[in-house]
Amino acid sequence: MAANLEIGFALDRRWHLLRGEMESTKKPVLLALARILDEAGTPYAVIGGIAVQVHRREPRTTLDIDLAVLDRAAIPGACLITAGFRETGTFAHSVNWMGPDGTPVQFTDDPVLGAAVARAASIDLDGVPLRVIGPNDLLHEKLRAGADPARRRSKRLQDLADAEGLLEDHPALEAELRDEERELLEKYRP
């Protein structure tokens, strides 16, 4: 699983180099977040594109780090600030931060993800435990996001592509689909 993340970090470096920027990756920010949240005792789970990297065989990259927490009040803001992070915005179910290197970080305390946070498993990333949403919960979250009309169409399509990819890599998850999720996927299948 951590090996899949290393491929994602390599894609980060290539993306920045192609843009003529300094070689960069989200790895230091992700490690810092994992350490800070662990030391603070904050329950969390990595979600979004990084979780897809963990649970898919095919490489995928993402520009940000998405995390689910049970309660935004438990986000150790002072520790994040000390580590060079800065808060950039607050919304209904999320708080946005920027890592010391400019990596966008989004914490969500959407109550729908509470059980997924509790079920998240730890993987080892350079000796640091990193809690990642499980593939079943990630599939349902990607389908929920793919069905959200408030999201940009391109984001919804990416979420549905991520869901299809998870089903390809984990065929047993097909049995976990709810009827409305199957219908959503069928709309986009040839």
Image (tube, helix red, strand yellow):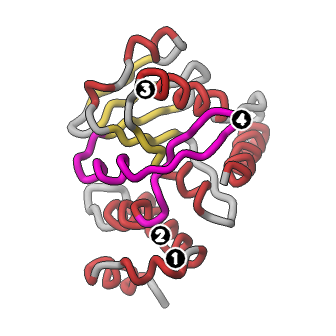
Q: Can you say whether 156 is above or below 188 in the image?
A: above
Question: Mark 3 or mark 1: which is in front?
Answer: 1
Question: Who is closer to the viewer here, 150 or 36?
Answer: 36
**SS at badge 2:** helix
Q: Amino acid at mark 4?
A: Asp
Rendered-image quadrant of the N terminus? bottom right
Q: Amino acid at mark 1?
A: Leu
CA–CA distance between discs 4 and 2?
A: 28 Å
Question: Mark 4 or mark 2: which is in front?
Answer: 4
Q: Residue at x 30, y 26 (%)?
A: 74
Expressed as whole percent of the image width and height from the top left, the position of residue 65 reads 51, 39
Segment tinted magenta in the rendering? 109-136
Which picture quadrant has residue 87?
A: top left
Circles 4 and 2 in contact, beta carbons < 8 Å: no
Residue to which mark 3 is pinned? 97
Circles 3 and 4 in contact, beta carbons < 8 Å: no
Q: Earlier in the sequence, mark 3 or mark 1?
A: 3
Residue to which mark 1 is pinned? 167
Q: Can you say whether 95 is above or below 62 in the image?
A: above
Q: Can you say whether 189 is above or below 157 in the image?
A: below
Question: Who is closer to the viewer here, 30 or 14?
Answer: 30
Residue to which mark 4 is pinned? 126
Q: Amino acid at mark 3?
A: Trp
Q: Earlier in the sequence, mark 1 or mark 4?
A: 4
Q: Can you say whether 142 is above or below 189 in the image?
A: above
Circles 2 and 1 in contact, beta carbons < 8 Å: yes
